[in-house]
Image (cartoon, coloured by chain):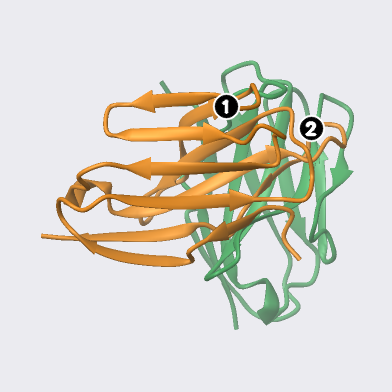
Chain colours: A green, B orange
């Protein structure tokens, strides 16, 4: 029962470096999401994908790009990391209006 | 400004006490979800409320959806230390399935 799998779990980047966070789900869900979670801010939506082949901006998309590679996979890319992007990142998947299933999170530190 | 406002932000109570936390918005939602998150984990769904005025019970937890479908509350009876965690409400903003979260209520139940 894998559910939603995120990699890596931890990452330290230097300012200006790039990286891609990977996310895969095995529940055949159409919708996938990327959130960041900061203290006192709850979960803020970065990007989402309502179905394979579509992506849309959420609340805080600046500095990020996404790719919905296929129905299973939704990746998040930081082209030039900044200290303000230090956060815990969560990927989630769901069917429209139904329960969202989350990965374990990626703790990213940008120094 | 968050789409969903949760209060209180922090709550610390003794085991056995009752408590209520709130989730409010100026927007109408087709449904609202409540999640609980423990440290180092992703949120896990507790309940979905769909109908205005709906009340759902999950053991000691009672969830209510406002008549106008703009707000919701979570009441816990006789809190236990195992109820400690971050309680998050979430809803679809109505724009093509972009699920938004409130900032959460961090509950601590002391023995």
Q: Quadrant of the N terminus of chain A?
A: top left
Q: Position of residue B46 (x, y in %)?
A: 43, 32
Q: Secondary structure at mark 2?
A: loop
Label 1 near label 2: C-beta < 8 Å? no
Chain for numbered disc 1: B
Nearer the camera: disc 2 or disc 1 = 1
Q: Nearer the viewer, residue B18 or A57?
A: B18
Asked if residue B1 can be seen in this view, the reply is yes
- Residue A12: horizontal and vertical position, in percent? 54, 72
Image side of residue A44 versus residue B6, left or right:
right
Q: Please tell me which residue is depicted at 52% across the width and 51% down the height of the picture.
A: B22
Image spot of residue B50 (x, y percent): 63, 23
**Extreme residue toward the top, this view:** A28
- The image's mark for residue B49 is 1
Task: Name the quarter where the C terminus of chain A is drawn.
Answer: bottom right
Q: Is residue B64 left or right of residue B36?
A: right
* Chain-order first, disc 2 or disc 1: 1
Task: Return the residue at label 2.
Answer: B97
Q: Eyeballing the image, is A46 above or below A101?
A: below
Chain to which mark 2 belongs = B
**Are labels 2 and 1 on one chain?**
yes
Label 2 to label 1, Cα distance in Å?
Answer: 16 Å
**A88 displayed left or right of B99:** left
Viewer-closest of B36 and B20: B20
Q: Which mark is residue B31?
A: none
Residue drawn at (81%, 50%) of the image = A58
């Amino acid at each position: 029962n894998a559910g939603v799998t995120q990699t890596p779990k931890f990452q330290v980047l230097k300012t200006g470096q790039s990286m891609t966070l990977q996310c895969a789900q095995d529940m055949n869900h159409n919708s996938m999401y990327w959130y960041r979670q900061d203290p006192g801010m709850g979960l803020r939506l970065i990007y989402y994908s309502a179905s394979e082949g579509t992506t849309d901006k959420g609340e805080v998309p600046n500095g990020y790009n996404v790719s919905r590679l296929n129905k299973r996979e939704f990746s998040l890319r930081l082209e030039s990391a900044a200290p303000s992007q230090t956060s815990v990142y969560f990927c989630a998947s769901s069917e429209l209006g139904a329960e969202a299933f989350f990965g374990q999170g990626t703790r990213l530190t940008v120094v | 400004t968050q789409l969903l406002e949760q209060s209180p932000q922090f709550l610390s109570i003794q085991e056995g006490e009752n408590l209520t936390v709130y989730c409010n918005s100026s927007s109408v939602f087709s449904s609202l979800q409540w999640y609980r998150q423990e440290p180092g984990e992703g949120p896990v769904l507790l309940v979905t409320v769909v109908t205005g005025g709906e009340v759902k019970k999950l053991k000691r937890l009672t969830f209510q959806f406002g008549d106008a479908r703009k707000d919701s509350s979570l009441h816990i009876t006789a809190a236990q230390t195992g109820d400690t965690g971050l309680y998050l409400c979430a809803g679809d903003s109505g724009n093509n399935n972009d699920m938004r979260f409130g900032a959460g209520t961090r509950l601590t139940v002391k023995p």
